[in-house]
Amino acid sequence: MQDQENQPSQNPEVEQAEEQTTPVEAPAMSDLETQLSATEAKLAEMHDAFMRAKAEGENIRRRAQEDVAKAHKFAVESFAEAMVPVKDSLEMALKVDTPTLESLKEGVEMTLKQLNSAFERNRLIEVMPAVGEKLDPNKHQAVAMVPAEQEANTVVTVLQKGYMIADRLLRPAIVTAAQPK
């Protein structure tokens, strides 16, 4: 029996089938391995690109947070720079030994000009309604209703100016308003 196992098979069809099986499987496995390695390389490339994009996104977020923190920290810097000369003028006025009424008035007027200039540069706008102007609850605060000859809900007197920074109300103008007749 052992001799029969070592001898080539007498059936040529079986030998032919065996020969065909081996060469067909080998290229298929090689092709799959090539596809697998190509897919793994592409996956590694995509993973690298993803990680780089993720890191870039985190860097952008971190830089934005730093910019916001700096903006909060230095937001008042421009206004402070404009206010320093006003303070200097007031301190100089107090150092004068024998001020005259006229020199004090002149110094106060000059200091007020500096202050108004600082307000303008920093977009701090006065809210000073005219008498007879319609009451605007977004800019005016009526503290009293008084009898008047003008139309109801209009400004009669301004007790205190209001201020806006750009388009945001800082303090409303305090006014008295006309009562309905």
Image (spheres, rainbow, N blue to C red):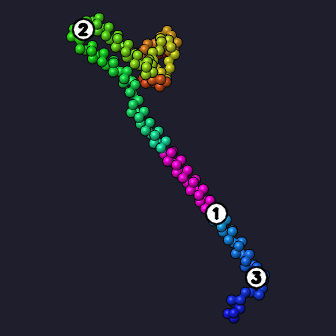
**9 vs 49: above or below:** below
Residue beneath the point at 77% across and 87% down: 10
* Residue identifier under label 1: 34
Residue 173 or 63: which is nearer the viewer? 63
* Residue identifier under label 2: 99
Q: Are marks 3 and 1 in contact (CB under 8 Å)?
A: no
Secondary structure category for the residue under label 3: helix
Magenta-colored segment: predominant secondary structure: helix
Query: Dividing the picture into quarters, in which one does residue 111 lie?
Result: top left
Q: Position of residue 3 (x, y in %)?
A: 69, 93
Residue 179 or 156: which is nearer the viewer? 156
106 left or right, relative to 147: left
Q: Are marks 2 and 3 in contact (CB under 8 Å)?
A: no
The span shown in magenta is 37-58
**Which three-letter amino acid code belongs to the residue tagged 2?**
Pro
**61 vs 23: above or below:** above
Secondary structure category for the residue under label 2: loop
